[in-house]
Amino acid sequence: MNDVIIACEADNTLEIEAALLFYRARGNGDIYATQHDVRVVDDRPALLPGVPLALESLAEFADLAAKRTSYRGFVHERVVYVAPNVLAWWVPACTRRVWFQHSGELGNASGDCQHPPLVFIAAPSKWSVFALRENTRPDAHTALYRAPYFNVWESGEICVGNVATPDTIDSESIKPYEDAFFRSRFTHTNTDKLIKGRGGALRLWKNLLDGAPFPINQLIDAKCTLADVVKKISTKD
């Protein structure tokens, strides 16, 4: 059994007060819950007879848990989806500096380049990025395209490497996530087909570093929508 560490803002003595028991129906998976007071006799806790857990009590329990597991506060204007431990936001097309540490032709190149509109999705175990064809706020049904960046897999997942990412996932972590991505050293391609056209991603970034506009029409369809990706990530995490 692993140790459980309880973090408190001050020194506190925790005393057991009550317990919740959850029952699941074998047939349809319905949940039934009971709440039990606890009596401590000779330093040994014992469950007293339980009562059905009322919706009001369950809501209070969920609210207390949400304060520790989900974001509360003003929502960033570029957020398009938020849930406990999952956040998706979009970045309008922009000009931003990038750095390369490439063993091939790009070498240690850097410069200001045009970027397509993007969508980032962050979760505890990974973060992903996709490109957009239209420079407008996406919705659930917006089609996504492969983000043609080095260090990004075909699935959109970003290879973190030694990049430091935020400890929390909320509106306050949007800028740190973006900085961690754009200020990293792009070292290698993680898939053969990141962009349409001769020369692939290598030729793309050489052209962009030379000041060429970003070729939106060369983006590759990821064959999924924003809702598809959010659902997949949410299910895993």
Image (cartoon, rainbow, N blue to C red):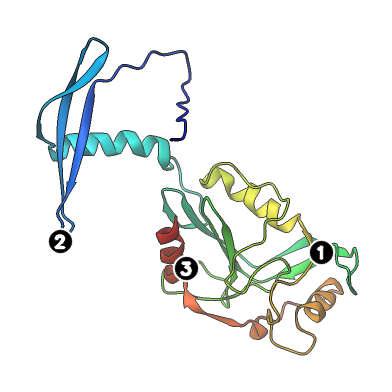
Local secondary structure at mark 2: loop
* Residue bearing the label numbered 2: 28
Front: mark 2 or 1: 2
Figure check: 82 above or below 211: above
Sequence-earlier tag: 1 or 3: 1
Q: Residue at x 44, y 55 (%)?
A: 237
At a point 46% along the width and 53% down the height, the residue shown is 86
Q: Nearer the viewer, residue 151 or 49?
A: 49
Q: Nearer the viewer, residue 199 or 90?
A: 199
Proximity of marks 1 and 3: CB atoms separated by less than 8 Å? no
Q: CA distance from mark 1 to mark 3?
A: 30 Å
- Of callouts 3 and 2, which one flags the residue occurring earlier in the amino acid sequence? 2
Q: Is 36 placed above or below 213 here?
A: above
x, y (%) of residue 88?
50, 58
Quick one: label 1, few (<14), some, or many (20+) residues within 10 Å? Answer: some
Tell which of 211 and 2 is nearer to you: 2
Determine the secondary structure under disc 1. strand
Crowding around mark 3 (Cα neighbors within 10 Å: few <14, some 14 to 19, many 20+) is: some
Farthest residue to the top: give it. Answer: 42
Q: Amino acid at mark 1?
A: Asp
Q: Which residue is mark 3?
A: 229
Q: Position of residue 190 (x, y in %)?
A: 70, 71
Dot 2 crowding, Cα within 10 Å, few <14, some 14–19, many 20+:
few
**What amino acid type should be assigned to the residue bearing mark 2?**
Asn
- Tell which circle, 2 or 1, labels the residue nearer the N-terminal end: 2
The residue carrying mark 1 is: 112
Q: Is residue 7 left or right of residue 20?
A: right
Give left or right: position of 52 versus 216.
left
Question: Can residue 213 be seen in the rendering of this structure?
Answer: yes
Q: Nearer the viewer, mark 1 or mark 3?
A: 3
